[in-house]
């Protein structure tokens, strides 16, 4: 969609009432910039309950390895639970859980503290100690949040693996993180069908070569599961019987909180490491500043799964540390009907909704008469995350969901950044459809040209982050060299985000998508290399190249071009078999939308595949410059075979 200049500069001033009551006032940007370390120290002391105060705000003597809030001691779970109960808010609802089949549960802060204490006691019984790792492979049920907080309470890092990932993906993450315990469920519900989880865990552990000693299994779907005596325990039998009090210890600000694997430009997912004090500070600041949270009255709903960073920061840690009430929903937006989200908002009187543009575009397709049937008047603020939101979707979200009264915060950040980095302050800035606008106070970003030295021109350039930030990743698990190489080697002392961006004449930032071989499908990061290696591992594939092609609903779609091996048939059945193979190998989200079987791939003389040209084909565009190809006729053949497919 092309936008006219007038549409691009259209802005929406914050509603008067919203601005008057907003947590953040306009002077915050300047105040933060005048002394950014002082600003973060002030935010941290105000928002986090420190057991022992910190000394130095930032130790950056060994870049890119940062230490924030040096010497401070805290317990992240205490900040999410105990302090609210101690402040007399134990009866406030922490989680309104809505299961896909329609079952619901509510936990107050006091109840959630009791459940987390039980889980922490159980993990201790299973031998989990401070510094250990626990893998969590659960659906979107309260036990996922409870498990994460139980780990945090013990100072053990969790590694949550998205329930949609395959046993292979789970297995490699368990091995890399050296997890001692896995927490899973018998199954979950998806599109009204129970789907299994435990068999994937069994398969991941079947070779007996992982460090896993125990598997805790939550009963959710009631499916029959295989059982390994001595290793497996029902959550109900262990956590259910454990003591509901647990005295917590306090850990160093830099104690690891979690590892979360994310796709990079090479085949192997990276274990992104986050620690405690800085992460919690920035997550809490974003709750206050970007989501304008009012814990006494808000009902927050972030629709992301806890398997992604958005679920870590804005389902588990942000809302609970802020002490607000929130909604956790297990299922899909169209089960049992396409009004399910709106029904949930009406039922719980949600005030803040945080979702991905891909969901908004899907709702647009289903039609605005569906949300119109529900009372959405409780909403006061909307958020967007995961991919650029196109102005048309922004305006639909604003008008149909937000009734033209809710500001929209388009939040740019990454697994690596831990919390929001670029987003409008909703009570201060006039928002602009499609633009994330400005870094949040205390954060400094730039859009630069290829040399990294000059500001990019109007056509755009690369997004970089100039200064360390509290919630920044502390490294890639067990791979310091890869950490330096991936993010800090392109430009000196500067974090390279991998995103293209441009600034408009007001200085507002617009995102242009990834500049590397990372795809963004429905707001989820996938690596072309990871899918290619999955494809070539199949006996029928000789070579494969994968691109992310523009897609109206999911932002990008995975399109694969493969050369089949000798003897394998060039047929729709083979293409389908390969799609299914990737789905099984990595997970259904990685399944290519289309597999084109071709006879050759476009390569430079040095043998590098030119994905840019394949992307042109996948997006139905005229193929770009082919002069650097070793054999320019390859593209004609590919275009012909794709057209004939
Ligand atoms: O390309 C950017 C895109 O998502 C990438 C980060 O993906 P992930 O680590 O999975 O985290 C997603 C949720 C924070 C970024 O490099 N991205 C994320 N948010 C936006 C975005 N692109 C444009 N606008 C956004 N608001």
Image: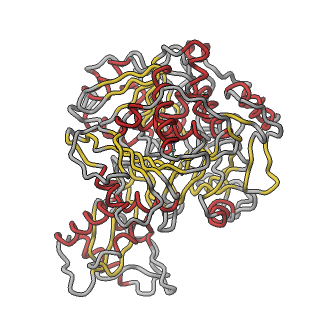
Is 103 placed above or below 356 here? above
Q: Colour scheme used in the picture?
A: secondary structure
581 on left or right of 519: left
Nearest the eye: 500 or 484: 484
Q: Is residue 380 visible?
A: no
Place of residue 116 in the rendered image (x, y in percent of width and height, measured from the top left): 49, 31
The residue at 31%/59% (across/down) is 591
Place of residue 515 in the rendered image (x, y in percent of width and height, measured from the top left): 54, 60
- Please state, as top left, top right, bottom left or bottom right, where the C terminus lies in the image: bottom left
Is 77 placed above or below 197 here? above
110 on left or right of 417: left
Place of residue 453 in the rendered image (x, y in percent of width and height, measured from the top left): 74, 59
Residue 36 occupies quadrant: top right
Place of residue 32 in the rendered image (x, y in percent of width and height, measured from the top left): 76, 32
553 on left or right of 613: left
Q: Is residue 275 visible?
A: yes
Query: Among all residues in the image, which is located at the extreme front?
Result: 230
The residue at 63%/50% (across/down) is 473
The residue at 61%/18% (across/down) is 22
Nearest the eye: 102 or 358: 102
């Amino acid at each position: 969609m092309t936008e006219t200049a007038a549409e691009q500069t259209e802005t929406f001033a914050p509603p008067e009432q919203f601005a008057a009551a907003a947590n953040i006032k306009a002077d915050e940007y300047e105040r933060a910039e005048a002394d950014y370390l002082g600003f973060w120290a002030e935010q941290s002391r105000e928002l986090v309950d420190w057991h022992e105060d910190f000394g130095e705000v930032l130790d950056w003597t060994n870049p890119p390895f940062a230490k924030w809030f040096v010497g401070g001691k805290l317990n992240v779970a205490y900040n999410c639970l105990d302090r609210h109960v101690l402040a007399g808010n134990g009866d406030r609802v922490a989680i309104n859980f809505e299961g896909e089949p329609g079952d619901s549960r509510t936990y107050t802060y006091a109840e959630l503290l009791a459940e987390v204490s039980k889980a922490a006691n159980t993990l201790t019984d299973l031998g989990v100690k401070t510094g250990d790792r626990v893998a969590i492979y659960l659906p979107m049920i309260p036990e996922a949040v409870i498990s994460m907080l139980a780990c945090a309470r013990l100072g053990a890092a969790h590694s949550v693996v998205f329930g949609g990932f395959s046993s292979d993906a789970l297995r490699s993450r368990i091995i890399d993180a050296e997890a001692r315990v896995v927490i899973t469920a018998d199954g979950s519900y998806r599109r009204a069908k129970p789907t299994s989880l435990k068999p994937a865990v069994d398969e991941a552990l079947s070779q007996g070569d992982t460090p896993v000693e125990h598997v805790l299994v939550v009963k959710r779907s009631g499916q029959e599961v295989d059982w390994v005596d001595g290793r497996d325990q029902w959550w109900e039998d262990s956590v259910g019987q454990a003591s509901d009090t647990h005295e917590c210890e306090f850990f160093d600000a830099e104690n690891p909180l979690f590892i979360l694997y994310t796709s990079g430009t090479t085949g192997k997912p990276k274990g992104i490491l986050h620690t405690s004090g800085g992460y919690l500070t920035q997550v809490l600041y974003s709750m206050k500043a970007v989501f304008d949270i009012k814990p006494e009255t808000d009902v927050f709903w972030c629709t992301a799964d806890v398997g992604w960073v958005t679920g870590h920061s804005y389902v588990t840690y942000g809302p609970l540390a802020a002490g607000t009430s929130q909604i956790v929903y297990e299922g899909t937006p169209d089960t049992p009907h396409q009004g399910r989200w709106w029904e949930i908002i009406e039922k719980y009187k949600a005030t803040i909704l945080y979702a991905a543009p891909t969901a908004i575009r899907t709702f647009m397709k289903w039609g605005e008469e569906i949300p119109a049937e529900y009372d959405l008047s409780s909403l006061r603020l909307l958020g967007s995350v995961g991919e650029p939101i196109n102005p048309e979707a922004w305006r639909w979200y604003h008008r149909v969901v937000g009734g033209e009264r809710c500001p929209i915060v388009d939040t740019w950040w990454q697994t690596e950044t831990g919390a929001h980095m670029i987003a409008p302050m909703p009570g201060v800035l006039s928002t602009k459809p499609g633009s994330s606008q400005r870094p949040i106070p205390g954060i400094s970003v730039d859009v630069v040209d290829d040399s990294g030295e000059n500001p990019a021109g109007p056509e755009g350039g690369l997004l970089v982050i100039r200064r360390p930030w509290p919630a920044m990743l502390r490294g890639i698990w067990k791979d310091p060299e890869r950490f330096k190489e991936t993010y800090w080697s392109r430009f000196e002392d500067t974090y390279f985000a991998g995103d293209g961006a441009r600034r408009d004449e007001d200085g507002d930032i617009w995102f242009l998508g990834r500049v590397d071989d990372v795809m963004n499908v429905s707001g989820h990061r996938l690596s072309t290399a990871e899918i290619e290696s999955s494809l070539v591992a199949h006996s029928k594939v000789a070579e494969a190249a994968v691109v992310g092609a523009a897609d109206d609903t999911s932002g990008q779609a995975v399109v694969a071009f493969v050369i089949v091996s000798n003897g394998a048939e060039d047929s729709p059945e083979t293409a389908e078999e390969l799609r299914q193979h990737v789905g099984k190998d990595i997970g259904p989200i990685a399944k290519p939308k289309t597999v084109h079987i071709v006879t050759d791939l476009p390569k430079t003389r040095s043998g590098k595949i030119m994905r840019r040209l394949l992307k042109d084909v996948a997006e139905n565009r005229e193929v770009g410059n082919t002069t650097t190809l070793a054999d320019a006729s390859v593209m004609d053949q590919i275009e012909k075979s794709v057209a004939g497919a």
